[in-house]
Image: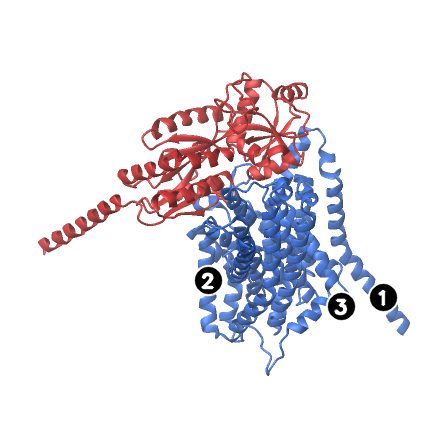
Amino acid sequence: MLKLKSVKTFVFASTVSLAAATGALAFPDKPIDYIIPFGPGGESDISARFQQPYFKEKFGQDLVVSYKPGGGGAVGWAQLNSMTADGYTIMGVNLPHIVIQPAQKDVGYTTDDINTFYMFHYTPDAIVVTADSPYQSLDDLIADAKANPGSVTMSGSGKATANHLAQIRFDKLADIKTTYVPFKGTGASTTANLGKQVKAQWGYTTVGAAQGDAVRMLAVAMEERHPLFPDVPTFKELGYDMVGGAYRGMAAPKDTPPETIKALSDAFGAINADEAFRKQMLDGGFAMLDVDSAGMADFMKARKEEYLQAATEAGLLN
Amino acid sequence: MGLEHLANALTLTNLALALFGVVAGTVIGSIPGLSATMAVAVLVPITFSMAPASALILLGAIYTGAIYGGAYSAILLNTPGTPSAIGTTFDGYPMAKRGDGDLAVAIACFASVFGGIVGALALLLLAPPLSSVALAFGPVEYLWLSIFGLSLIASLSTGNVLKGLAGGALGMLLSCVGVAEISADIRLTFGVSPMIGGIEVVGALIGLYCIPVLIDLVATPERHLKVEQGVRAVRVREAALIAWRSRLNLLRSSVIGTVIGILPGAGGSVAGLVAYSEAKRTARPDQKFGDGEPDGIMATESANNATVGGGFIPTLVLGIPGTPPDAVILGALLVQGVRTGPTLFDGGGSIVYTFIFGLFIATILMLPTGLLIGRYAYKTIVTIPKTILVPAVGFMTIIGTFAIRNSVSDVIIMIVLGSVGWVLSRFGFAASPIVLGLILGPIAEQGFVQAWIIGDATGNLAGMFFGRPISLAIIAFTILSLVYPVIQSRRAKRTLATQANLND
């Protein structure tokens, strides 16, 4: 009796490992669910949609994008680790969200719970004004803010977000006081800026790309100028040490086998290496980033320290 | 010659795509929970291999079909298939109850087509100038617009204003659950982690409207809808006649729908409610809104389909999506390499104009297909025995709620809300005020907080809230729609009194 049971166990175990082995060989051999923890139309959705056709072309399988919005992404991330850990379910991941949210309060997950396997781009912070704004340069804005503390209103997407952290950091660097007005998403924040409800916007380079001649960017938070905007200076050039923005990548449930994680990381690395893909992303105003699963721990550690320090100083964490 | 063939082929393909899109959209929209946004999002990858104009036509057709399809379940099951159809339940379901469901479905179809055409016309002729409306609306305007929408609670709950207001307050309270949209505070979750996502509007709609209907179906021996005995003539002509008599209402509601569709912060549900409110305010004394008045259906259905064309205006001109489905379509366009903005109309105009033309075709195709599918849907719902209808609809509510964001907790919330809603309805609390609070509460809150921050920073709080022309106009309309019914009933009383005096 006992013997039979152990035989059964053995047979079962070997079937499982066999399935796992063949799975690893032919990965991916079926469509992959790519869950975006936000609604459609934002930067997370659009960049995932950019990846979609390249994934199909390179690996012959569909990347099926679906949305699981709620709690600024928290609802999705809190459920990620309870999803099937076979590599066929992955989820979009955003920084600083996954650092700030769990640091502020209990959102059902911790930063270290999220098994991020690739970071593929970021949207650099940028100050955006309308084409007819009196602010011709960053100095104009700073001068106005110095003369009238608090009266320079700047729209941005949400509170304790990349936009908000950028506003806090820049206010400190330039020794000015501006008023941050949170809106629901970049679209609403852009609308408020274009409609002159506010004087400027804390947005991203993607806003500059989408709005074209309707807006002017005063500075971008990159190491070097964005190829799409050769005339827009970086904050660094102007003497403010600001490089960063909202980072985006993909994560898989924690129990996903390491070889599958490696395969996923390689697959998305291959998409990121595709020249046509890079060009499409740059034309959209995104900035590329190539952090694979091997380099993720270091990258996340550095970001975590940076964000937590900024948020603590700003009083966003109690 | 080759080019000509190509053009012909393109037109044929586009026609087929428009037809397919409208039919698929209508069916999807009629199922509560399966929304226009979802239908469009699922089909986006298919469009990658298409020409941009064809892709747009397919997505636009699905969108417009889904907005119309939402009317079926609103009329026949008292459950809005999409949030845009909330107002359609007010008069649609009473009409179906008294045996006029087929007429209601046909009226909804005419109204939808009319509204869709008005919206598409605005998109074709006036898109660049109209897009400035989207920018003229700041936080304060959204605040007052949502308060205008909330004022509908008072006129909806005639004779029971207190219960209506209580329902509205409950709805606004429910809308606070979860992570606050702009302040990122976590509110009213009571430590339950799935509650962080808040109460999903579509799930709440299904619960509050559909579950009570299902319970009543099981609890009462009568048929679901009253059916007239004997052979009945096709009611398309009757519906067309009613629609023609109310052409003014149709036109006004379509214009309201187009303008509200342009506002990125509003959408089909707000458009339908505002149009309904205006139709009610300007109604003839013999019209009983809320009791099965065809004009009520016409107002919401023409307005919500007009938001389709209206919503594309900021999407294409400003690159700012007017409604959630527009956001998905905008993403698809970007992947296709189409840049939105005013230049799209000037330079690359061919894509835009092919698309707008396609939207017209899709809207017109909605007339025959909508009437056909509508008749079939009506017959099915009427003839199907309760023992099959109840489990089938019950199953759909659960699937639909789950599908919104693949969440089991949404299903639980839906069932709890539905049960609470049924109990409350026993005590005379209607579902609609709760839903209005749930939808409009967050818009009002965001508008208020943002307006306060901006007003405070510029040192002009009073001017912020009460000094802007559009705000003042909306405030005036709100007061008008609150006070008008009172004046009207006083006048009626006075006339009655004078008549009584004369009779003496």
Say above or below: A143 vs A3.
above
Say above or below: A291 vs B65.
above
Report the amino acid beneath label 3. Asp
SS category of the residue bearing label 3? loop
User: Does the CB distance between marks 2 and 3 fall below 8 Å?
Assistant: no
Residue holding disc 1: B495
Q: Colour of chain B?
A: blue
Instruction: Choose between B275 and B304: the one closer to the eye.
Output: B304
SS category of the residue bearing label 1? helix
The chain holding disc 3 is B
Residue under the point 75% across and 37% down: B467
Residue under the point 70% across and 54% down: B255
**Label 2 vs label 1: CA separation?**
51 Å
Residue B117 x, y percent position in the rendering: 66, 58
Residue B9 x, y percent position in the rendering: 53, 57
Residue B224 x, y percent position in the rendering: 54, 72
Residue holding disc 2: B396
Image-quadrant location for residue A292: top left
> Outermost residue, front direction?
B1
Is residue B504 shown to the viewer in this render?
Answer: no
